[in-house]
Image: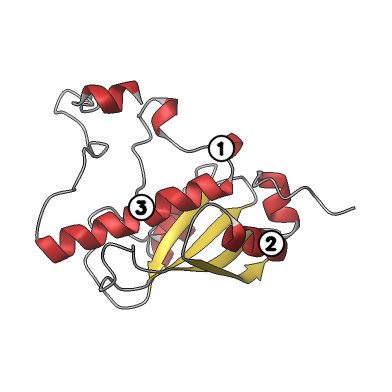
Amino acid sequence: MAPVADGSYGSVRADPVRTAVELQRGPVVGIRARVLSHSMVATTWALEFAPPPPFPHYPTEMVHLSVFADGQVVTVPVGPMRRWLHRYPQWSVTEFVSYRGDPIPWLFVCGGLCLWNPDDPSHLRWDWPLGLDAYVAIVQRHLWMEEFCREHHSPWPVEDTPHGRHPGGKPYPILTPSLRAA
């Protein structure tokens, strides 16, 4: 019996081809998806996002989205080399081989996009109960905002999750009432 295509971790890992088809039919517009690889370690899709309708001159954005066996999800931009404001530095082979922690922080290994601050309240972060299409919508929005910043030489166009920490170690506060209430 085929799994229900609900965007859950189980259905996504069980049937990656169906997941690709469902992502293209889902609520995220202008997306093409295909399976690149599927193994016990991870499933990876190639995703292409068409430019946003108000900015047809924006480039088609390409990423590899990987779902690892431990449930971690990482998205890495591919294609032409460009400056990325919110991307983790990719670990070297030496860093990966010498790592002794558990679980493996795939965001650092792969040089994935930083889509939210891990210290944010849960309602401002993505997790599996929201479904993979909600994650993909966050990726698409993030890519478009990155391009906006590059094109206009401007800061992030909306309040973003503050990155880094105050010198005292506490996370930066969320400033706008609308984001605090989100």
Is 182 displayed left or right of 86 in the figure? right
Q: Is residue 166 above or below residue 45?
A: above
Distance Cα–Cα, label 2 vs label 3: 23 Å
Question: Which quadrant of the view contains residue 56?
Answer: bottom left
Q: Residue 16 — which label? A: 2
Residue mark closest to the camera, 1 vs 2: 1
Q: Indicate the secondary structure of the residue bearing disc 3.
A: helix
- Report x, y in % for residue 17: 70, 66
Q: Residues within 10 Å of mark 3 (few under 14, many from 20)?
A: some
Q: Residue at x 25, y 58 (%)?
A: 146
Is 4 displayed left or right of 114 in the figure? right
- Report x, y in % for residue 8: 66, 43
Residue ID for mark 3: 141
Q: Amino acid at mark 2?
A: Pro
Question: Which quadrant of the view contains residue 63?
Answer: bottom left
Q: Is residue 100 above or below residue 53?
A: above
Callout 1 touching callout 3 (CB < 8 Å): no
Residue mark closest to the camera, 2 vs 3: 3
Q: Is residue 59 visible?
A: yes
Q: Amino acid at mark 1?
A: Leu
- Report x, y in % for residue 37: 63, 70
Q: Is residue 57 above or below residue 95?
A: below
Q: Amino acid at mark 3?
A: Arg
Residue ID for mark 1: 130
Q: Earlier in the sequence, mark 1 or mark 2?
A: 2
